[in-house]
Image (cartoon, grey):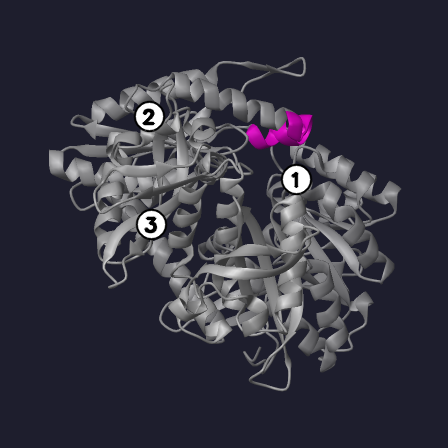
Amino acid sequence: MEADRNRLLRLVEALPQPCLTVLPVVDDDGTLVDVVVEDLNAAACRLLGGEHDALVGRRVSEMRPGLAPELLTTCREALLSGMHHERHGVLDPDSDGDLLLDVWAVPLGDALALVLDDVTRETRVVRALEDLQHSYRLLADHSSDVVFEGGAGPSIDWISPSVRDLLGWAPEEVVGRSVADLVLPEDRPLIERAREELALGLSVQYQARFLRRDGSTVWLAADVRPVYDDSGAVVGRSGSWRDVSAEHAAAELLRFRDLHDPLTGLNNRTWLQDSLAELLREARGARTSVAVLFVDLDNFKVVNDSLGHAAGDFLLQEMASRLRSALRAQDRLARYGGDEFVVLVPGVRDPGEAEGVASRLLAEAARPVVVHGHQVMLGASIGVAVSNQRSTPQALMRDSDAALSRAKESGRGRIAYFDRSMHKQAMQRLTTEDELRSALAGDELVVHYQPIVEHASREVVGHEALVRWSHPDRGLVPPLDFLPIAETTGLIVEIDRFVLHSVCRALADRRPELAGHVSVNVAPRHLQETGWRRAIEETVAAYSVPTSRIVVEVTETGILPLLESLQPDFALLRAEGFGIHVDDFGTGYSSISLLRDLPINGLKLDGSFTRRLGDPDGKAAVLAAGLAALASSLGIQSIAEGVETEDDAAILLAQGWTHAQGWLFGRPQPLPDATHAR
């Protein structure tokens, strides 16, 4: 115990808290009446007001009468029950106030170790006290952490018994060995670097994998501090080890989740970018190429919407497994998002290698899958891009995506390869996107209005607001040249908002050209935005426009995937007086469900029906007539779009279409003298 006491004093000598060992003084009845200083550190000398040698052997009551009663109370409890802590208020002789002291007492053989902390002034030493308390607990075998000491050399001179529980080694088996002998070889540089820093008088913290006696490993966090002699020279070290294996396991799990898709277990988009960059660096050095295969599942959306998301999840998991099985050991697979996957094919010397991988992927995707008792045929489309020595990850992904678009446009179930013409199209697309962003900021967008007429009388009863782009160099840009890009980039949301503000401003100005209601389009991407309905309501209210003047127009194919989530918002809009029309009606695979589930008050026949009314097979005309009858029976307004000839108008009128829209009745035009102000 004498050795433990000396060791403890060495550990705390450099602490700023007063630390001392005292010997009890008892009366004839064995009652503790005072304590005599046996040894103390510099901070205790300052507290008691004297030099070290002059204070040793003296009673505390002689030096600090106001402190002695509190110390004795704590010491009595420590002698009865072991380590004890109390907080005391003590009169400060140097001021008119009190000191608030935390007093710790630990029995050490026939003596007591005391630590006093002035918590009224120094909160920064809380950690040091916790470390000291921890050391006491270690000495009392109350902790599984390990405390050790060593001299100037690499070997361990003393280690606490808890090393047996932590590493399986008996203390005597560890004493005399270097810490470097206890860690995995790849972690030994950490130990050497720590030794160098300790020799410079620096405290060090590190985490390393230690070897247990049974050969297993455990992650330990080390906190090691230098030990000084009286001259201030570093003569050794003392420290502790703590098991942090659980923290490392949790961190590894988080890293795994950061880089993997939770549904399929495949690597995700974050991993993909880093992995592709790594493969391109290797390819440049080896003078080879990397092929990127962008895979999109055909018909997945139809199955997902028909059978439900649970079936969709099962399909994605099944397809992930199939795609993985079609790859070679060196190929890498990731889920990019939704029903899209990306395969990285490294070390390509012949483009045929990438084609072989793509063909196997197509074959796997084409095999039928049984989902909830239904046999489903999906298939896939694949876009392929092969790197050159100047390729970047971003450019290669962009090129493979462009090739995928070509594959899907060519009829799906195909493989398409990126070429120079596609590169030109991709660059034009990027240019258009950049210019469109500038157009939104520079007031280049304008709103044109196309009249909607009551079919029989041809009286104008409303208008549809259509956005146009007045490009400073290219003139009026056709909508099909920029709206699809706006949809995929998300710019369509800002465009929709611009149109609604322009329409409300015109209605607020009571423009006589705008008779009846005005239909404003809300894109599918916009409907996915949180708060889209509230934004419409607030905009219309800000201009004091009656809600009955505004019709929210949505496309049938755009709202089908969102049908369930949109029902409450559409119900509120209708209750507030807004109109809701479904555009492009008849182009989706489940049109009737919209009429059943949404509170719409109008549908618009897609122009593709109007253009084919005269087809010899007569199918377009029959379907158009059926839809008109359906709208009439439901009591909702029916509007035929794309009417350009008197013959078409007559057929549609006879079929029962109550309203019409098209060039026959008026082309989209800006308001006279309308400004571009937003």
Mark 2 or mark 3: whose residue is earlier in sequence: 2
Residue sitting at x 53%, y 26%: 316
State whether residue 315 is above or below residue 246.
Answer: above
Identify residue for label 3: 426
Q: Which one is in front in this view, the residue at disc 2 or the one at disc 1?
A: 2
> Residue 546: percent from the left, percent from the top?
81, 72
> Residue 404: percent from the left, percent from the top?
39, 36
What whole-number distance in Å separates the C-alpha atoms at marks 3 and 1?
Answer: 28 Å
Mark 2 or mark 1: whose residue is earlier in sequence: 2
Q: Which one is in front in this view, the residue at disc 2 or the one at disc 3?
A: 2
> Residue 430: percent from the left, percent from the top?
36, 56
> Residue 420: percent from the left, percent from the top?
24, 44
Dominant secondary structure of the magenta stretch? helix
| Amino acid found under the numbered disc labelled 2 | Glu
Looking at this view, is 237 or 299 the one in front? 237
Identify residue for label 1: 561
Mark 3 or mark 1: whose residue is earlier in sequence: 3
**Label 2: how many Cα within 10 Å (few below 14, some 14–19, many 20+):** few
Number of numbered markers? 3
Q: Which one is in front in this view, the residue at disc 3 or the one at disc 1?
A: 1
The magenta segment is 300-310
Label 3 residue SS: helix
What whole-number distance in Å separates the C-alpha atoms at marks 2 and 3?
Answer: 69 Å
| Amino acid found under the numbered disc labelled 1 | Pro
Residue 415 shows in this picture: no
Label 1 residue SS: helix
Which quadrant would the C terminus be assigned to in this image?
bottom right
Label 2 residue SS: helix
Identify residue for label 2: 173
